[in-house]
Image (cartoon, grey):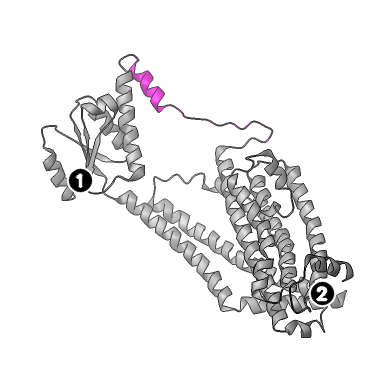
Amino acid sequence: MKQARRQVWAVLRREYVERVKTKGFIFSTIAIPVMMLGIIGLMTFMAVRAEQSNRQMALVDFTGQVGQEVARRMDEAGYDVEIVDAQVGLEELDRRVLEDEIEGYVVLDELTVQEGAFAYRSKDSPGPVRGALLESIVVETVLELRLSATESAGGVRALLGGDRLSFERLGDEAQSEVEEAAGLVSGIAGVIILYMAMLMYGAFVLRSVLDEKRNRVVEVVISAVTPGRLMLGKILGVGSMGMTQLGIWAACAALIGLLGVPMLAANLPEADLSNLAEALPGIGALALLLAYFVLGFFLYSSLFAAVGAMCGTEEEAQQTQFPVMMLLIVPFLLQMFSLEGGAFPWMDWAAVFPFFSPIMMFPRAVSGAVPWWMVGMSLVLMVIAVGATAWVAGRIYRVGILMQGKRPTVRELVRWVREA
């Protein structure tokens, strides 16, 4: 037993050291946080510039009825609105826009009172957000004017400015809207992390096995280490490298958050960041993510190691690994179809399938879409599947790692598993 541990540790250390010293590992480990920092910095810069941009606007009211109320609501939305006398020509307002004295101006006429139509004149398009805001202000004001002919003005304002949809979850475990949104975001982020990590690091295991087999290095290594321990050492080595890389990325993300959020709050004082802490994933969600990553990595790495042992060339490996990749792609597509976890009842049970659980069960668990016992069942089944898959993959690896020539058939694989 002690000798077995030493052999596995030797292979693990070799795989880990060789990979963390490569230029690709160093570049990707540094490039991802730098790219994240650049994207966040660019988004913050654009948000600050948009907030500090020229918001001076003019309003011409040819109706004599809705101009004051529209201007008041635009002021509340953050615009500095100047009500211009209707006698002032539009050519003068065009000149002020072209000389950047004002950003643009709104024209209200009789058609506004009849249909809610109005004109916005500026050098630049208002964009979807500003356009929707101006449309809602004008339409609500006109609607209030039309309804006030039969209802009291106060009642119309209360109706237009009242609360919208209020969602209440039925069941034993009630969640606030912030908690549910946080669970949904954490689940989607976790799906992407798990999918990319298992696909990327599983491919590393396959390439490592294939390179050693192709270069005949494995024939020398096998003389000192048994095939099963060699496979286990490779999987643990690549997994340790993956945990190191993900840990560095997580630490950088936390550091960027600690530095970026105060900067964002200082530059955007109107932004509501009070619920940010509640929106972050908790310790339980992170621990569950780690559990699904570890079990999913062992599950798929065993399959990728077996694929590498079967094949003699990279072209054969690309064809053979397709069924393994489909086991990742199918649950990913199903989960993207049901973002909130549970478009159809059978999808919850499909998430219990061990090869689908890392991708489909984690978002359901953090969003509270499935009961806790289904989450526990998926973890138990994954543990069983890891053991069974490792046993089968180990037998294929034991024979295939020394085989040369054409790729084995399914019947030959069954014979390897029986006779290994």
> Badges 1 and 2: C-beta atoms under 8 Å apart?
no
Taking the spot 40% from the left edge, 55% from the top edge, the residue there is 44
Is residue 170 located in the magenta-colored stretch of the structure?
yes
Residue 56, x across and y down, in percent: 24, 44
| Magenta span dominant secondary structure | loop
Tell which tag, 1 or 2, sits nearer the viewer. 2
Would residue 389 be counted in the magenta stretch? no
**Vertical side of 271 occupied by 158: above or below:** above
Sooner in the amino-acid sequence: mark 1 or mark 2: 1
Q: Percent from the top left, x then y, of residue 366?
A: 64, 46
Quadrant in the rendering for residue 399: bottom right
Q: Residue at 70% of width from left, 52% of height from top?
A: 357
Identity of the amino acid at label 1?
Answer: Ile
Q: Residue at x 77, y 68 (%)?
A: 409
Specify whether 214 is left or right of 184: right
Along the viewing direction, whichever of 108 and 240 lies nearer the viewer: 108
In the image, residue 232 lies at what x, y percent?
A: 77, 71
Is 82 drawn above or below residue 379 in the view shown? above
Around disc 2, counting alpha carbons within 10 Å, would you say few (fewer than 14), some (14 to 19), or many (20 or more)? Answer: some
State which quadrant residue 104 falls in: top left
Front in this rendered view, residue 331 or 289: 331
Q: Which residue is mark 1?
A: 102
Q: Which mark is residue 341?
A: none
Residue 399: assigned label: 2
Q: Evaluate whether residue 298 shows in this view.
A: yes
Nearest the eye: 67 or 305: 305
Amino acid found under the numbered disc labelled 2: Val
* Boundaries of the magenta span: 150-173
Element marked by disc 2: helix
- Looking at the rendering, in which quadrant would you find the N terminus? bottom right
Q: Helix, strand or loop at disc 1?
A: loop
